[in-house]
Amino acid sequence: MPIKYVPFIPEPIEGQAVLGNFNRILRYQGSDEVSMTIQRGMPLYEVEKQETVGENKDGNMVIRGECVSACAYLKEQGIQVDLVYIDPPFASGADYAKQVYVRRNPKVAEAIAQAEQELDIEELKSFEEKMYGDIWDKEKYLSWMYENLMAIKSIMSDTASIYVHLDWHIGHYVKILMDEIFGEDNFINEITWRRTFAHGDVGQGAEHLGRISDKILFYRKSKNFVFNHTFMPYEKEYIDRVFTHTDPDGRKWQSVSCTATGGTTKGNPFFEFLGVKRYWRFTKERMELMYKEGRITQSKPGAVPRQKMYLDECEGVPLQDIWMDIAPVQGTAVENYNYATQKPGVLLERIIKTSSNKDMLVADFFGGSGVTAAVANKLGRKFIHCDIGLNSVQTARDRLKADGAQFEMLEIKDGVQLFRNPVQTMDKMKTLIPGLRNEDSLDSFWGGAITDSHLGTVPVYIPNLMDSNSKLLDTVLMNRIIHQAIPELDASVKKVIVYYIDITNEAEIRKFIEDDDSTTVQIELRDLKTVLDDVVIGDEAEFHMEEVPEGMFPGFRVTIDRFISDRVLSKIMEFNNKNLLNTKKAFKPIQISEEGLETIEFLSFDCTAAEGVWHSDSELKIDKNGFVILNGVKTKTFWDGTIRSDKKPLRLKIRNICGDETIWVIP
């Protein structure tokens, strides 16, 4: 349950024209419901601090949770952000997956190769794990996006700007939303970013042009916004064509006019200079000084003097709204973090430099790989990284820690974070609901159906964990179920089951159902958390600690003897079985040793506290080639199955290759 609801805007919005322009321009099913959601406010949940990295005097945050809930927390804390960049789902209908690599077995690593040798590509066994599904219908997406944008606006400072990164699927609709929320007068630019080069799928037989660009919508919150002019270097062709003169010292320059428009209203001075009477752009004193400095040229006596404009003193071409000079993240790039939707750091650097100053707060509520926070930190800005996916916050955390950033890891306890991400949670829980099956005859509103010997087909509603509107069961959602979803069912349906993650007031909802006599269909309510409790299965580890009094690494050493992750093993089994059924190609199954150390990605010691907030006093990460990243520093050393520290460790944290983290107290 939320602790309370935080208003999106300071004043009560009862009776205000929320969604007014939007409804007139684009009417769609669900727009009235999102208006009621806005009136209710943002749900504020308990927020748990997971880890503190460094002193964090600037209050930087990495938050696991939904955008709306994160904004409720920030607003309750009185925190305002100065720049927002978001790269939300594009409503593209695509699934995004992370490539999970099985690590090298440290027990046999030394026998395989020397530390400098790369792992044979044939030994790089991997499988995919779904991160999230960008599968929306237009109406649900727009309602969801409207609520997120309203929440973001509520915590933006008066001088703040927002950049929303989208593509051709839905960007034109979101533009209308942003005109409604931020005001048409506060629209600054629609930036076109060429995100890739020519596509090969538009040749003969194709029915569309190559889609190689994304759109970034740029809005300000008010007229008093931060905007730093950015200049791009001149192209060589332009330099050769325009800067045609060269001084003896090699400085290139072009000849530009010194004259100005005349008339009393212009205010430009009129005087004689080098025998020529004109209106001039500069005062007579300034012209004489420039002449002494050699900055005025005259081709012959009586010719109109002109100014020398030196190339090395020109700032360049002012930044335009078509960006063709920023390449996407390549597979071999140093900044590649194996994250499906990762954007290049140069793109964020341009945005952050244009719309913020040092020490300002930059936020990304669909943070992905953590590029916004990482670039903001390097440019001397404060940052907030927020994402609902576990893989996102772990990627951002490791990246920021390696950069020497200081921050807090926070988790919003709203019931969704019981698994890696909402999509995987939903996929898993459907298998845990007894008797649930897909039913093609049902609308997509229903998650499936259960067959009952007495009642026949029983449709089952399962909340979409990507959509905060459906996560909370309140009178608004129940009204939709009773008056829209149930009437569309076959007349033979006698009962429906409604699962919920969160509920405003169960007694109130049951009374609402009893008081409504518009349907005879029985409605059963069930708490989904009882199902989700069975989703998370903890990993098991056997290890021993020893004190190393002297030698190259004196201190304490923990050796991992055995590690078992049932979830990782089940994913590998599923992958193997699927590929073994493919008779068209040979397949070598992934095999895990008895020790299971190949399924470990990250280890950390807490030498500060035996409970509570985590302090990573010593940590190592094993990259996909088996090499160790020790406290953020890349090495060419294979992992040997141990982790060391100068101080005595009190707790051990292990993250498996799929992202699950388990903590053990060290006796």
Image: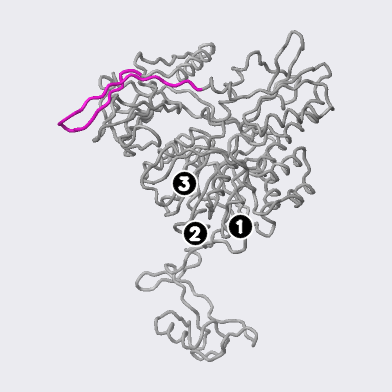
| Residue 200 placement, left or right of 23 | left
Q: Quadrant of residue 528?
A: top right
Residue that carries the numbered disc 2 in the rendered image: 232
Reply above or below: 654 against 458.
Answer: below
| Residue 581 placement, left or right of 547 | right
Of 417 and 439, nearer the camera is: 417
Task: Give the distance between the C-alpha atoms of the residues marked 1 and 2, in whole angstroms.
Answer: 23 Å
Counting residues from the start of the chain, the first of labels 2 and 3 encountered is 2
Counting residues from the start of the chain, the first of labels 1 and 3 encountered is 1
| Residue 60 placement, left or right of 416 | left
Q: Amino acid at mark 3?
A: Ala
Q: What x and y, as percent, mark residue 83?
A: 54, 53
Residue that carries the numbered disc 3 in the rendered image: 373
Q: Amino acid at mark 2?
A: Met
Q: Residue at x 44, y 14 (%)?
A: 589
Q: Residue at x 65, y 42 (%)?
A: 145
